[in-house]
Structures are given as C-alpha cells and as structure tokens.
Image (tube, rainbow, N blue to C red):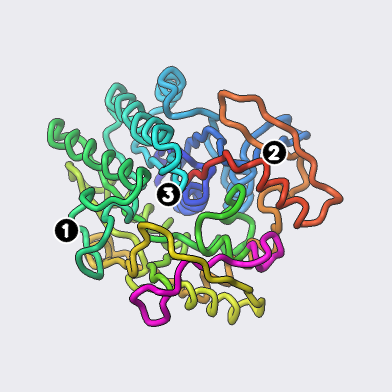
Amino acid sequence: MTNQLILVTGAAGYVGSHCLIELLNNGYKVVAIDNCMNAIETEDVTHHTIMPESLRRVQTITGHQLVKYYKVDINDRKQLDTIFNEHRFEAVIHFASLKAVGESCQIPLEYYRNNVSGAVTLFETMKKYAVKRLIFSSSATVYGYPDYLPIDEKHHTGRNCTNPYGRTKFFIEEILKDLCNSEKDWNVVSLRYFNPVGAHDSGEIGEDPQGIPNNLMPYIAQVAVGRQPFLKVFGNDFNTNDGTGVRDYIHIMDLASGHVVTLDKMLSESDSGWEVYNLGAGTGYSVLDVISAFEKSTGVQIPYKIFDRRSGDVDELWADIGKATNQLNWKPKRSLKEMCAHSWNWQSKNPMGYRTNNRTEMKSKPVTQTNQQITIKGKSIQQQQQEVNNNDMDMVAYE
C-alpha cells in the first residue's frame, strides 16, 4: 500500500475513470477533478451528493473512496489554488482535454484554449506549490503521417500533424520539454496513446460518447445495441489488405496499467527531465478486422455501409512498444477478442451509457453553466439516442 496522494484531472472521462480503478486498486489515494463537460452527473438522494456517475461506479468496483472530488475546470486558476492549498500531492496525472479530431477542425480556438491554455495554468499551479512530477496524457496524433512503421518514439512529431487536436498535444509536449530543460527538478512523462478501446470487465464503466461516436469501437457497440442503424466505414480504397484503414487498438485496462507502472517508477526513482513512451498493442487491425472480431466474440451482426474516405486519414498506423516493454516492464495482455467482448459487455448492460442508473440523472453541463434535468424513462433506445444526438451535437468528448 503506497498511500501516496495523486491528483487526476479529467478523472470522469473514459481513460481517466479506468485509470482510477488501477490507481485505487494499487493503493494510491486520489483527488479527482473534472469540469463535467462530457459526463453524466447523478444525485445520490440518500447522501445528497452530486458527482459523475462514472466516479461513483469506480468507487463501487474498487471498494475504495476518492479522497475528494471537485467539479473544476483546469483553466480556473483560483479553484486550482484552493485544491493545491488543501492537499499535498506527490504527482499529477493530466487527462483533461478536448479530444474530437473532426471537431477540433471546426472550433480550433476552443481546443487551444482548453487544451493548451488549461495545461499551462495547471503547470504554473504545480510549480507554485512545488509539485513537479507529472504524467501527461498525449496521443499518437503527434506523429501525423508516419514516415515508417511501426512508429517508435524517435519518429519526428509536429511536422505532419493533420488536425488542431494533434497539434495541441504536440504543443503541450514542447512546453513540457522546455520546462524540463529550464528547471531540472521536474520529472515529466508523456504517454502517447494509440487507440484505447474496451471496458472494465465488470461492465460497470466504459466509453460513453455523447452524440454520434467519433471512434470505431463505441460506434460498433452502439450499432449492436440499436442506438445507431448501421456503421459508417469511411473508405475501402486504402493501401491495406482489405482496403480499410489499419490502426493500433489497445485495451483500456492495459492502457491504465501503463499509467500505474509509469507512476510507480516515477515515485521510486530520482529521475528528472522529460521522457516519452508509446502505449499501444504493437500490431494493427483494419476496420473490417475489428467488425469481424466483434461479430465473432458477441454473436451480434454489425450492418455497415461504405462512405468516401475522410481527408487526412492515413492508410496504416501502429506502435513500436519496445521502449515501454524494456524500461517500464509493461506490455499489453488483452486480445482484440477481449476488447470487443468487454465493449459489448459494457454497452449491453448500459444501452444508454451512464444515463441508465437508479439515481436521479442529470445531463451535465460545464461548470460555468447550469445543470439540466433529463428524463428518459419509457422511451425506446432509438428515441433516447435521437434526443442525445440532437441535444449533444455541440458537446465535445473528454479523455
């Protein structure tokens, strides 16, 4: 049992909530913050508390309570000061981020303000309170179009980024490099994710995108449960075996374990400076491979239609994970079949995601706005999903 206190930003999101399970199960104490822009909050009428449903379920799964949860935006310097005054953190894991690639092209200023400006505000607060250990949630999008495969950490970044989201991750990495070069007592690790999929094997938490999913696996799962009529496959003319794009998919719990081993190493050694690791499966699967694996592992047929490929999509992309394997003693354990089975377990148990629960449900708005009550009982999944699509087209996903 470590009992060391960790601050987790963006804790209610898909990656953040699954990482909380690993942190709590490994003895870490956690203070969680999230602005709830993309979370379903619920009210516990017995204890008169309101918090993201994902965090409630994390506590139930692990049997451990968070030290505290704050509904806070990382751009709010005053609120961050309050949190850092109240707690002494050993390290920060920074997940909070807008993450929809397509949307980042439509509202780039929002992405730069939330992702880059928010990160700088967080780093300045960490410096003020002498908390100088950080794990940063980065992305394979920093690589852009790959010059070679598999992609290792030596591959250039930034030069070929195809969207503002990827550039925000690249800019933050550059800021962190500059910070570590100027102040030698910082210890920073960037973890570059490839494509996290799946869910905790309990089926109690999982990926719950608002509106129409941007990513393949939740889209497939929503088709399987009846929330979407069919899967849109963008392009069958890629230079791949079956003509569909190839990507590296990693189970979310393998990704979560990568954060814990990184944190263990960070806290047990006296390293300083900036370091980076790829976290992926180390192999690529096409869109049709994933559809086939889902159908075989669940017995559910997935209807799909082919559409024109999207501008900027690359043919193939997968990771070289040798550095993480050698230096962190980490490697993914779960197969594509398990990724599909666990995604279906989550979606079939929770057809409408976190909206399906026994507490009072509230559609969450950012901390600067007022919560809005929603009622979904007595309506079909298709009716409920249409309302979600109509209401949430302006919402954005958090990691």
Q: Earlier in the sequence, mark 3 or mark 2?
A: 2
- Queried whether the magenta region covers residue 31, the answer comes back as no
Query: Which element is circle 2 on?
Result: strand
Q: Is residue 214 above or below residue 233?
A: above
Residue kind at label 1, given as amino acid type: Lys
Q: Is residue 295 left or right of residue 85?
A: right
Mark 1 vs mark 2, CA separation in Å = 44 Å
The residue type indicated by label 2 comes to Thr
Residue sitting at x 38%, y 53% = 260
What residue sits 47% from the left and 44% below the top?
A: 103
Q: Main secondary structure of the magenta part?
A: loop
Q: Is residue 68 left or right of residue 265?
A: right
Span highlighted in magenta in the image:
222-243
Mark 3 or 2: in front is 3
**Is 81 located above or below residue 395 in the figure?**
above
Left or right, 393 with reference to 172? right
- Give the labeled residue for mark 3: 101
Residue 154 image label: 1
Marks 3 & 1, CB-CB < 8 Å contact: no
Numbered circle sitting on residue 259: none
Residue 16, how many percent across, how many down? 48, 47
Secondary structure, mark 3, is helix
Q: Spot the residue most to the top.
A: 78
Q: Is residue 271 above or below residue 121?
A: below
Q: Quadrant of residue 97?
A: top left
Q: Amino acid at mark 3?
A: Val
How much space separates mark 3 and mark 1, taking CA atoms? 24 Å
Packing grade of label 3 (10 A; few <14, some 14-19, many >=20) is: some
Judging depth in this view, the residue of 379 and 277 nearest the camera is 379
Circles 1, 2 touching at the beta carbon (< 8 Å): no
